[in-house]
Image (spheres, rainbow, N blue to C red):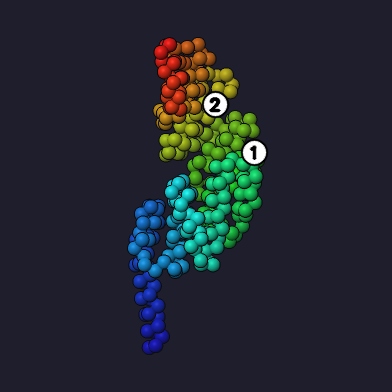
């Protein structure tokens, strides 16, 4: 009888914990991370493993998605507030990610090298649910250091764990940097066919244009640059390359038009006005 009472008591406590975090878990599993984060405001007992594990996971998710508020303000604070020893791999990964963000700001080879040194992807060192992102961060750091073959290995491993489409874009850039334009185009086509993000599609189209521009095939390059603008128009590089293609093809008036557009995007209004007044 006593055993039954103990078991019932444990089940009641488990049910209470489940119901308490049910809203968070539903949002988190549905990838509604900001809603999941906000739902934690309702929890009063914050010094528990249940709370800390959910808080650090969701803040990491939002930071990895590029939410600057979480990267600059919340992630470091959550890391310092997380006391549970069982979450040490989340804390460690969070610190490496912050270091990676700093390396992106500084664009310093030493920082990128330190990221690859710190990010040891071995069992238990990185949380399983962030393994794809860990390989991706390592791959991008290697790419920025010019270690293109190593970067490809990391990025392909990331894609195997979870198919993050931007990995394909970075792989294409590795091949482009190694002058393997056929492989670069192969991966750019994969991005164009798979991605849902308009900016990423436009980047892939733009870089396909770059491949043909390098070969002096300005008509083909132009077609890809124009397609890139359809997906994302507010990019001065796209408009500048469109302008250069028209110039190479002998269309000076159209060249001036697109040059004015890219100058306005860059908010170089004085020069744009100069071109406007003489054409």
Residue at 46%, 63% in the rendered image:
53
> Of all residues shown, which one is farthest toward the bottom?
1
Query: Of tags 2 and 1, which is closer to the observer?
Result: 1
Report the side of 20 relative to 101 (left or right). left
Residue 179: x and y, percent? 63, 30
Between 248 and 187, the residue placed more toward the observer is 248
Q: Is residue 70 above or below residue 172?
A: below
Question: Which quadrant would residue 226 be assigned to in this image?
Answer: top left
Residue 110: x and y, percent? 65, 45
Residue at 49%, 42% in the rendered image:
165
Crowding at dot 1, Cα within 10 Å, few <14 / some 14-19 / many 20+, comes out as some
Question: Which quadrant would residue 25 be assigned to in this image?
Answer: bottom left
Q: Is residue 261 above or below residue 51?
A: above
Q: Specify the label residue 210 is tagged with.
A: 2
Q: Are marks 2 and 1 in contact (CB under 8 Å)?
A: no
Q: Is residue 143 visible?
A: no
Residue 214: x and y, percent? 58, 23
Residue at 62%, 46% in the rendered image:
111
Distance between mark 2 and mark 1 Cα atoms: 19 Å
Residue at 56%, 58% in the rendered image:
92
Q: Is residue 235 visible?
A: yes
Secondary structure under badge 1? loop
**In the rendered image, which residue does mark 1 sit on?**
146
> Of all residues shown, which one is farthest toward the front?
270
Disc with the residue nearer the chain's start (2 vs 1): 1
Q: Quadrant of the C terminus?
A: top left
Residue 51: x and y, percent? 43, 65
Q: Quadrant of the N terminus?
A: bottom left
Secondary structure under badge 2? helix
Report the side of 180 relative to 205 (left or right). right
């Amino acid at each position: 009888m006593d055993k039954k009472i103990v078991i019932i008591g444990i089940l009641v406590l488990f049910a209470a914990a489940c119901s308490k975090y049910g809203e968070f878990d539903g949002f988190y599993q549905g990838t509604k991370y900001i809603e999941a984060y906000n739902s934690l405001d309702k929890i009063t007992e914050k010094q528990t493993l249940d709370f800390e594990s959910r808080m650090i996971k969701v803040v990491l998710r939002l930071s990895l998605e590029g939410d600057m508020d979480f990267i600059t303000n919340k992630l470091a604070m959550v890391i310092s507030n997380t006391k549970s020893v069982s979450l040490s791999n989340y804390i460690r990964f969070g610190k490496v990610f912050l270091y990676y963000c700093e390396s992106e700001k500084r664009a310093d080879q030493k920082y990128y090298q330190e990221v690859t040194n710190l990010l040891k992807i071995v069992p238990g060192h990185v949380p399983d649910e962030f393994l794809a992102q860990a390989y991706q961060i390592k791959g991008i750091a290697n790419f920025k250091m010019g270690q293109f073959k190593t970067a490809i290995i990391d990025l392909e491993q990331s894609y195997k764990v979870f198919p993050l489409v931007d990995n394909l874009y970075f792989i294409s850039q590795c091949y482009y940097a190694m002058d393997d334009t056929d492989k670069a185009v192969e991966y750019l086509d994969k991005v164009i066919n798979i991605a849902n993000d308009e900016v990423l599609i436009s980047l892939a189209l733009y870089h396909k244009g770059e491949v043909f521009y390098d070969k002096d095939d300005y008509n083909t390059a132009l077609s890809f640059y124009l397609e890139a603008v359809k997906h994302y128009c507010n990019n001065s590089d796209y408009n500048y390359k469109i302008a250069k293609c028209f110039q190479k093809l002998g269309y000076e008036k159209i060249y001036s038009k697109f040059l004015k557009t890219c100058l306005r995007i860059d908010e170089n209004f004085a020069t744009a006005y100069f071109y406007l007044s003489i054409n």
